Image (spheres, rainbow, N blue to C red):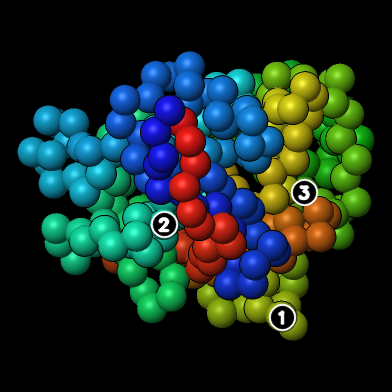
């Protein structure tokens, strides 16, 4: 076993323990997929990442590092909070990007990460699948969420690696009141979004500046798990909602409220159409692990 540098990072918050935790092994060289998965499962966190040198192809394209992203039971081609948390840990450990932005290589290819003061933001990858959900899916999701079908006012495939199915409810209050049925929603990755205050008009928001409340449910830990704050889902929701005129080009989403967290996800679509998904991160644990 080898002593490897390690950080546990809280993502989408500047206050420790109010965001989404991530385990980051900063030197994953020589570890097998089975070892990475076993360590991820042991951490009992929603995700764990392993930093590696860029592949030959990635190095030629300007990648600063390659990352493998795991959640309990499986590897992910991309995930948002692991992207920001890994970049935060890599920079904190002395990583020096080749250019102005950090460039991450992962299962979906290259992901650019920009620095904006204490906040990092990733460029949302292209959706692998979009378009409305099937009627049968929407009916099943409504039943699993315990809401009337008419309470789902919009829906969309939000697949950017994780195969999120996104649904919009009438209000943030309705989103926070959900008590999903794990048996009905078994095997599905569900993202739920609800507006707070007036949205769809640039600059309009409720009193604390939050446009949407978001919740994410996915298979994990032997049943249906809820993610505290989800970068990949918020990225795909932003591409959908802004593109459909359901959200302004710049807004803040809240996630984790139902879990007593206070995640804040900053969304901005710039002139070239790129959607940036940002948030702050803070390291809560650093040291070494034996792997």
Camera-side residue of 2 and 179:
2
Foreground mark, 1 or 2? 2
- Residue named by callout 2: 89
Report how far apart the C-alphas of labels 1 and 3 lie in the structure: 20 Å
Is 289 displayed left or right of 94 in the figure? right
Foreground mark, 1 or 3? 1
Residue 169 tag number: 3
Pointers 1 and 3 in contact (CB under 8 A)?
A: no
Pointers 2 and 3 in contact (CB under 8 A)?
A: no
Crowding around mark 1 (Cα neighbors within 10 Å: few <14, some 14 to 19, many 20+) is few
Foreground mark, 2 or 3? 2
- Indicate whether 171 appears above or below 210: above
Sequence-first disc among 1 and 2: 2
- The residue that appears at 29% across and 37% down in the rendered structure is 52
Is 224 displayed left or right of 269 in the figure? right
Camera-side residue of 160 and 220:
220
Quarter of the N terminus within the rendering: top left
Residue 164 x, y percent position in the rendering = 59, 33
* Residue 259 placement: quadrant: bottom right
Pointers 1 and 2 in contact (CB under 8 A)?
A: no
- Residue named by callout 1: 208
Report how far apart the C-alphas of labels 2 and 3 lie in the structure: 35 Å
Q: Residue furthest left?
A: 60
């Amino acid at each position: 076993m080898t002593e490897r540098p390690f950080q546990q990072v809280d993502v989408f918050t500047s206050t420790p323990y109010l965001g989404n935790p991530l385990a980051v092994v900063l030197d994953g060289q020589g570890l097998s997929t089975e070892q990475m998965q076993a360590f991820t499962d042991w951490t009992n966190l929603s995700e764990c990442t392993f930093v590696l040198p860029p592949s030959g192809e990635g190095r030629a394209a300007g990648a600063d590092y390659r990352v493998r992203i795991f959640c309990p039971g499986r590897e992910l081609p991309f995930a948002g909070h692991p992207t920001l948390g890994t970049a935060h840990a890599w920079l904190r450990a002395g990583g020096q990007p080749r250019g102005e932005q950090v460039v991450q290589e992962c299962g979906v290819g290259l992901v650019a990460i920009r620095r904006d003061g204490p906040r990092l933001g990733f460029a949302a990858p292209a959706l692998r699948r979009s378009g409305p959900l099937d009627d049968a899916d929407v009916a099943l999701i409504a039943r699993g969420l315990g809401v009337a079908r008419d309470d789902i006012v919009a829906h969309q495939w939000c697949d950017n690696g994780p195969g999120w199915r996104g649904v919009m409810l009438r209000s943030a209050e309705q989103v926070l009141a959900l008590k999903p049925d794990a048996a009905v929603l078994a095997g599905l990755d569900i993202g739920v979004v609800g507006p707070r205050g007036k949205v769809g008009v640039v600059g309009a928001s409720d009193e604390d500046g939050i446009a949407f409340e978001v919740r994410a449910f996915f298979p994990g830990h032997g049943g249906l798990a809820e993610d505290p704050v989800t970068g990949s889902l918020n990225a795909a929701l932003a591409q959908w909602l802004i593109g459909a005129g359901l959200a302004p080009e710049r807004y803040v989403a809240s996630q984790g409220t139902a879990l007593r967290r206070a995640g804040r996800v900053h969304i901005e679509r710039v002139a070239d159409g790129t959607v940036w998904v940002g948030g702050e991160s803070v390291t809560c644990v650093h040291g070494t692990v034996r792997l």
